[in-house]
Image (cartoon, rainbow, N blue to C red):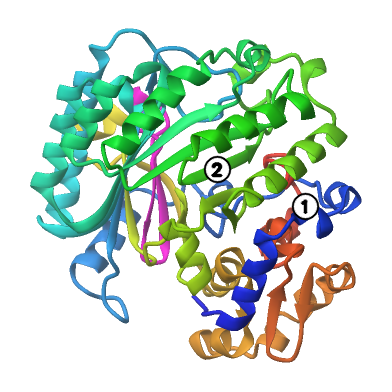
């Protein structure tokens, strides 16, 4: 990972906190509104292959356990996927199981215990963990007792270090202040609420009804309980949304003052995600309206004390994520932007994705397949990828762009034994329209994303994506705007 020139980055940050309407025109937003990856990894998960299986993942675990890597093992992060939800949200593209039968949780927790034990058998007990995240689905589908059991299993197998980030995604419809108190008592110190939109018509259209008042009560409770960071998820481009209605939601979220905001563009891919077939295409806002929604969100949040972190994420100036952005310590993983250094990631649960050294792996996507592998005493890895040397070089460039907005040629050259200008000659040429458009600056030493370009950093990163350039198939991705 390259390090930025701090003075330049801080200058960019100052531009980000200013009124963005002077930097980003509607015309610029429209021209860059194309599909593209979110780059929580490179290569992206759609490039994983079934030829990578349990044996390959075991080898990666052995390399970590035996210290076979140059530079030794990195810190460890853990992600646990809880797939269950009581009802379906029509926009959802997550791997989920819709059920009101909470007794299904017991079998799933048994399977997680088995999967945890298989990992411990390979890397040993007591491995230090600096980041633990529960996502879904809806982790709060589990009862307090079930969540406590899961955390107990994890703590028995791993060592959660002091100061570790322990976070959970919460569906406001399945939570209460008393529930949040129980979560805090278990050791969760970060919490994320799925809001998406507060407009009643939009909520009805996506089958997710929750009042502003109920969410406000939860956020006030979380703040009183001392959670270190409170995040709110929003989506623009949903059915029945208008620029005016979404501006009201923005104002309501600003009034709630969460520490962080994740603002996602809705990707309507009904051929891939069955619940989205219940959304009437005619009710989706047109491109011009989406552009106005994004512009209003950027203006509203940055105008009320939020720093634009990158890739649709905002944080209050005093939040650790904003500080990491200012100081060039920002990182990116499968959960998004993080203050944690690059870490090996163990993904537990159905469909979870992990990263171990120069490999990625993904678990079985269905419960029967996941359970069957574990009953056979086998890790449920069904696909993944061993990165090539070229992948590793390009990952360094793309993550430097996504996190610092700057790539220094010498740093990449020394780390990967290449001459940057030669290795990426075609990419430097392809950047020229972005240079002319004021999105990127390129000199003899570095690529610098400008204040305007930072809002479209995905597009800049896409220039260095060899896989994407090879097939030009982008319909699988959400749009940049």
Mark 2: give few (<14), some (14-19) or many (20+) Cα within 10 Å. many
Q: Which mark is residue 472?
A: 1
* Quadrant holding the C terminus: top right
The residue shown at (87%, 47%) is 26
Q: Is residue 330 left or right of residue 140?
A: right
Image quadrant in which you'd find residue 223: top left
* Relative vertical location of residue 416 with respect to residue 56 in this rendering, above or below: below
Q: Residues within 10 Å of mark 1 (few under 14, many from 20)?
A: few
Residue drawn at (63%, 46%) of the image: 301
- Counting from the top left corner in percent of width and height, residue 63 is at 26, 68
405 to 48, vertically: above or below? below
The x, y position of residue 161, in whole percent, is 17, 58
Q: Which residue is mark 2?
A: 262
Residue bounds of the magenta highlight: 350-369
Q: Nearer the viewer, residue 253 or 27?
A: 253
Residue depth check, mark 2 versus mark 1: number of the one nearer the observer:
2
Q: Quadrant of residue 287?
A: top right
Figure quadrant of residue 144: top left
The residue at 75%/55% (across/down) is 20
Give the alpha-carbon distance from disc 2 to disc 1, as whole Å.
Answer: 28 Å
Residue 43 among those drawn in magenta:
no
Name the residue nearer the viewer: 335 or 275.
335
Q: Earlier in the sequence, mark 2 or mark 1?
A: 2
Q: Point out residue 415 in the picture as x, y percentages from the top left corner.
A: 49, 86
Q: Is residue 387 visible?
A: no
Q: Which mark is residue 366?
A: none
Lateral position of residue 363 relative to residue 121, left or right: right
């Amino acid at each position: 990972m390259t390090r930025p020139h701090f003075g330049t980055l801080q200058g960019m940050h100052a531009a980000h906190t200013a009124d963005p309407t002077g930097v980003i025109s509607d015309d610029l937003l429209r021209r860059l509104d194309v599909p593209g990856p979110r780059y929580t990894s490179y290569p992206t998960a759609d490039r994983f292959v079934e030829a990578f299986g349990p044996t390959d993942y075991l080898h990666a675990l052995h390399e970590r356990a035996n210290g076979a890597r140059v530079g030794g093992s990195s810190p460890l992060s853990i992600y646990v996927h809880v797939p269950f939800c009581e009802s379906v949200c029509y926009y959802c593209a997550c791997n989920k199981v819709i059920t009101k039968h909470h007794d299904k949780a017991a079998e799933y927790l048994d399977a997680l215990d088995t999967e945890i034990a298989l990992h411990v058998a390979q890397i040993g007990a007591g491995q230090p963990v600096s980041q633990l995240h529960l996502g879904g689905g809806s982790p709060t589908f589990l009862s307090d007792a079930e969540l406590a059991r899961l955390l107990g299993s994890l703590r028995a197998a791993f060592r959660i270090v002091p100061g570790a980030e322990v976070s959970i995604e919460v569906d406001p419809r399945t939570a209460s202040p008393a529930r949040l108190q129980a979560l805090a008592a278990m050791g969760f110190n970060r919490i994320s609420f799925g809001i998406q939109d507060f407009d009643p018509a939009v909520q009805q259209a996506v089958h997710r009804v929750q009042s502003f008042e109920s969410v406000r009560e939860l956020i006030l409770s979380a703040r009183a309980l001392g959670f270190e960071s409170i995040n709110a998820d929003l989506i623009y481009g949903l059915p029945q949304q208008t620029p005016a209605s979404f501006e009201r939601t923005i104002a309501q979220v600003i009034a709630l003052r969460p520490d962080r905001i994740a603002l996602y563009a809705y990707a309507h891919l009904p051929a891939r995600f069955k619940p989205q077939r219940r959304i009437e295409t005619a009710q989706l806002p047109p491109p011009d309206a989406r552009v106005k929604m994004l512009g209003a969100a950027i203006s509203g949040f940055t105008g009320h004390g939020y720093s634009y972190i990158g890739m649709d994420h905002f944080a209050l100036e005093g939040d650790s994520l904003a500080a990491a952005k200012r100081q060039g310590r920002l990182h990116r993983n499968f959960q998004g932007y993080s203050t944690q250094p690059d870490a090996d990631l163990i993904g537990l649960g159905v469909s979870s994705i992990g990263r171990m050294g120069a490999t990625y792996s993904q678990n079985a996507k269905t419960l029967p397949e996941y359970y069957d592998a574990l009953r056979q005493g086998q890790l449920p890895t069904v696909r993944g990828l061993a990165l090539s040397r070229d992948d590793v070089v390009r990952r360094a460039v793309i993550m430097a762009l996504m996190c610092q907005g700057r790539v220094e040629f010498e740093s990449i050259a020394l780390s990967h034994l290449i001459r940057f200008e030669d290795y990426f000659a075609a990419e430097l040429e392809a950047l020229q329209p972005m240079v002319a458009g004021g999105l990127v600056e390129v000199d003899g030493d570095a690529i610098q994303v400008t204040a305007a370009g930072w809002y479209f950093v995905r597009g800049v990163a896409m220039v260095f994506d060899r896989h994407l350039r090879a097939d030009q198939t982008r319909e699988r991705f959400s749009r940049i705007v």
